[in-house]
Amino acid sequence: MASVTESIDVNVPVTTAYNQWTQFEEFPRFMEGVKSVSQLDDTHLRWTAEVSGKEHHWTAEVTEQLPDERVAWKAIEGHGNAGVVTFHRLGDNETRVTVQLDHETEGMMEALGSALGADSRRVKGDLERFKELIEGRGVESGAWRGEVEQGQRLR
């Protein structure tokens, strides 16, 4: 497993940053290589992405979701990955978004790229594009404020 942790400060309230992040189907707008994300239900997502020139598909389960604080997930089929995104209020209009990601590398090229920091650069670029997207809009495109614990929707 390869691990990445990256953060960025965005100039929007924590609620705005969190709400935008819950719009999973918009991830291709700022995540490099992500071709599509389809929300199957409140806690399951179907991903298609290109990694190192290879197309990968997987289904992920949102394992924890706490409004304005965190979204955690794990792959339950396909390309192995898991992680958490946390949201930290720095001020009325400033939020730190931190992504922690663990993922399987397939083959020598992916493992080498990961070892050379390609994963960190990719996540950092994704966060920079998220910052541009949300600051450019100033408002979220939607929101899902439900809570999830151990993969089950609480409310």
Image (cartoon, grey):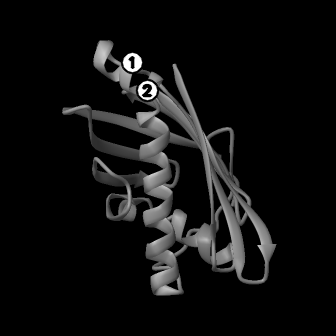
- Image coordinates of residue 150 in percent, x first then y, are 68, 38
Residue sticking out furthest to the bottom: 138
Quadrant of the rendered image containing residue 144: bottom right
Q: Are marks 1 and 2 in contact (CB under 8 Å)?
A: yes
Residue type at tag 2: Ser
Residue designated by label 1: 111
Question: Relative to 105, does residue 155 appear above or below in the rendering?
Answer: below
- Image coordinates of residue 138 in percent, x first then y, are 53, 87
Mark 2: which secondary structure? helix
In the image: residue 94, left or right of residue 91:
left
Q: CA distance from mark 1 to mark 2?
A: 5 Å
Quadrant of the rendered image containing residue 16: bottom right
In the image: residue 63, left or right of residue 46:
right
Question: Relative to 108, does residue 7 appear above or below in the rendering?
Answer: below
**Residue 114 tag number:** 2
Q: Nearer the viewer, residue 23 or 100?
A: 100
Residue type at tag 1: Ala
